[in-house]
Image: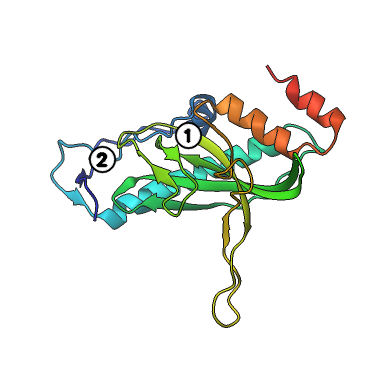
Amino acid sequence: MSMFRYYASKTPPQASGPGLAIYTNFLRTGRISRQDDWVEEERRYLTEEEVAERTGKRLESAGKKTHQRLNSFHRKIRFPEIIFHKTLATAPHLGYVHVTASKTDIAEHKDVTWGFYIANFSAEISGDEHFFSHVSPGYARMYFAVAMKPGEAGEGAETPRPVVNRDIHDNGVLFRTSDPKTALKNVLMLGARNVELRKIVAAIG
């Protein structure tokens, strides 16, 4: 159950136009716009399901825009769009979105599968079954990539669910940052397949 109560906002919607680029601002600052969402002055409570739905839509929209930016950097660095999100059970205004996944060599480990995520909160990433610890209840931004591997097969013909690959850096975390430019550079570096491409990515200011 959520630790918070949410109110529906009745703020009049602003007129849209070519100069209003909601998600461009997200990519620049890492902040997801929440204007016209929920404020304490309004009377109607939002259900946890409504809050989670709104959060999910914003996270997935931001994830799609981020994926587009990643794939626009260089024609030889391409990532699949694998967008899905999850909100926190005790705080449905907070959540994270999976943006893309790929494989890369990390030290002596070959073809390591990894996933890139964006969260609208800050937390420590432990890599254990709870994954996040010391979650900040306020809005923040966090970009991170995690090494994954197939989990144990379930009963019957169930496909094994991926789990964190703790053979990589003990907790599977490849990077964690609050800076969108650093995140972009790190993901592109993971996707660069040769020395020439890595030099191009490394030159990003």
Residue occupying image coordinates x 55% and y 28%: 180
Between marks 1 and 2 in the image, the one whose residue lies nearer the viewer: 1
Label 2 belongs to which residue? 38
Q: Are marks 1 and 2 in contact (CB under 8 Å)?
A: no
- Amino acid beneath label 1: Met
Q: Residues within 10 Å of mark 2 (few under 14, many from 20)?
A: many
Judge left or right: residue 78 versus residue 96.
right
Q: Using the image as rendered, state which of residue 158 and residue 94 is in the foreground.
A: 158
x%, y% of residue 158? 58, 76
Disc marking residue 169 = none
User: How many numbered markers are drawn?
Assistant: 2
Q: Residues within 10 Å of mark 1 (few under 14, many from 20)?
A: many
Residue occupying image coordinates x 27% and y 54%: 48
Label 1 belongs to which residue? 142
- Amino acid beneath label 2: Trp
x%, y% of residue 27? 54, 30
* SS under mark 1: strand
Residue 14, relative to residue 117: is it above or below? Answer: above
Is residue 183 in sight in this rendering? Answer: yes
Q: Earlier in the sequence, mark 1 or mark 2?
A: 2
Marks 1 and 2, Cα distance to the nearest angstrom?
A: 22 Å
Residue occupying image coordinates x 61% and y 40%: 169
Give the position of the N terminus as an image quadrant. bottom left
Judge left or right: residue 89 versus residue 26.
left
Q: Using the image as rendered, state which of residue 133 and residue 49 is in the foreground.
A: 133
Judge left or right: residue 94 versus residue 183.
left
